Image (spheres, rainbow, N blue to C red):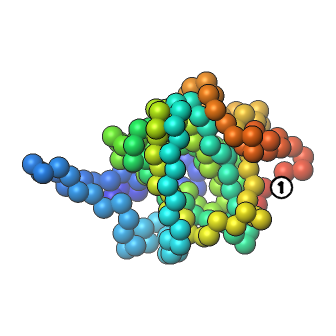
Amino acid sequence: MKFIEAPLAGAYSIELEPFVDDRGLFARTFCQKEFATIGFYNQIVQINYSVTRQKGAIRGLHYQLPPACEIKIIRCIQGAVFDVIVDIRKSVPTYLQWFGMELSKDNMKLVYIPEGFAHGFQALTDNAELIYHHSAFYSPEYERGLRFDDHALAINWPLPVSVISPRDQSYPLIGDNFKGIEI
């Protein structure tokens, strides 16, 4: 695996290094020793799977408050998505900055999202499938979100929005009351 630093401190794009032969390919998607080189010593406690049926659909931007903050490692296993992370760590220079990258079955990239980030994505194809590895259990009482269309973030989603959940549409806009989180 190649760990490539993202423009937001602590986040990484991860490129797999597949072994290819006449049978197909083999690639490691997680190795505790290799992830330790970027400071990941946590356990993976939950693995989730999602299917987004419609191209243009957006999921997110979701995060969990302390003490339930989580690290996520995400890979697209079918189709393609535009994956977005937003730094909401109040004490860092990249506070409220975002980074986006394409994750797809074909490019086999992963994204490593540290604690203190909101995460969302837009499906670039129908039936986009993701696998999420989490370092903390889902805790609905600590879950929050940012609006995908908040002008304070100015995220450049690549497609017109086709579908978004009522919950994701109802998150408040960032304003004077948004304090970010302390990690």
Task: Decide if residue 147 is on the left or right side of residue 47.
Answer: right
Note whether 126 is above or below 31 in the view shown: above
Where in the figure is residue 173, as x and y percent of width and height? 82, 41
Q: Nearer the viewer, residue 90 or 145?
A: 145
Residue 29 placement: quadrant: bottom left
- In which quadrant is the C terminus drawn? bottom right
For this orientation, the residue located farthest to the right is 176
Residue 92 placement: quadrant: bottom right
Q: Amino acid at mark 1?
A: Lys
**Residue at left offset 52%, top offset 30%:** 55
Note whether 121 is above or below 110 in the view shown: above
**Residue at left offset 53%, top offset 72%:** 45
Circle 1 crowding by C-alpha within 10 Å: few under 14, some 14–19, many from 20: few
Q: Which residue is mark 1?
A: 179
Viewer can see residue 183: no
- In which quadrant is the N terminus drawn? bottom left
Q: Nearer the viewer, residue 32 or 131?
A: 131
Q: Nearer the viewer, residue 29 or 180?
A: 29
Where in the figure is residue 148, as x and y percent of width and height? 70, 38
Where in the figure is residue 84, as x and y percent of width and height? 58, 43
**Residue at left offset 53%, top offset 68%:** 46
